[in-house]
Amino acid sequence: MIQKNLRKLQRSLSRKVKGSNGYAKAKLKIQKLHFLIARQREAILHQLSDYLTKTFDRIVIENLNVKGMMKNRKLSRALADVGFGMLR
């Protein structure tokens, strides 16, 4: 749902004239949506880390090459949405 809304907003921004008031308003909407997405990701990761630390005595994290995995076009969006690098 959020991806579709973001795609729609970015498409509308690309059709605006740079420097116009409509461009500024569309850009502000996109910024707000990105902020919302980031806050949701932070909240979910905080809930997960809190649950893990309260539930388990020992936590082991595998050292993954997240930067290399982000280069894969099929995995990159899913990895960014999950926030793989942020949890660690």
Image (spheres, grey):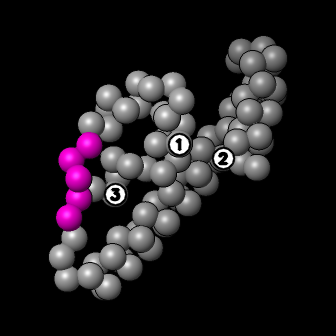
Dot in front, 1 or 2: 1
Q: Say which residue label 2 marks.
A: 33
Residue 34 quadrant: top right
Marks 1 & 2, CB-CB < 8 Å contact: no
Question: In the image, residue 41 lies at what x, y percent?
Answer: 51, 57
Q: Position of residue 2 (x, y in %)?
A: 71, 48
As for residue 32 lying within the magenta part, the answer is no
In front of the other: label 3 or label 1? 1
Disc 3 and disc 1: Cα gap in Å? 14 Å
Of residue 23 and residue 47, the one placed in the foreground of this image is 47
Against 20, is 38 above or below?
below
Amino acid at dot 1: Ala
What residue is shown with label 3?
Answer: 87
Is residue 61 magenta-colored? Answer: yes
To which quarter of the image does residue 10 belong?
A: top right
In the image, is 16 to the left or to the right of 77? right
Front position in the image: 15 or 25: 15
Q: What's the residue at 20%, 64% (across, down)?
A: 60
Q: Is residue 34 visible?
A: yes
Span of residues in magenta: 60-64
Q: Nearer the viewer, residue 33 or 87?
A: 87
Quarter residue 69 falls in: top left
Reading the image, the residue beneath label 1 is 78
Q: Residue at x 42, y 71 (%)?
A: 48
- Whichever of callouts 3 and 1 sits on the residue coming sooner in the sequence is 1
Residue 73 % position (x, y): 51, 25
SS label for mark 3: helix
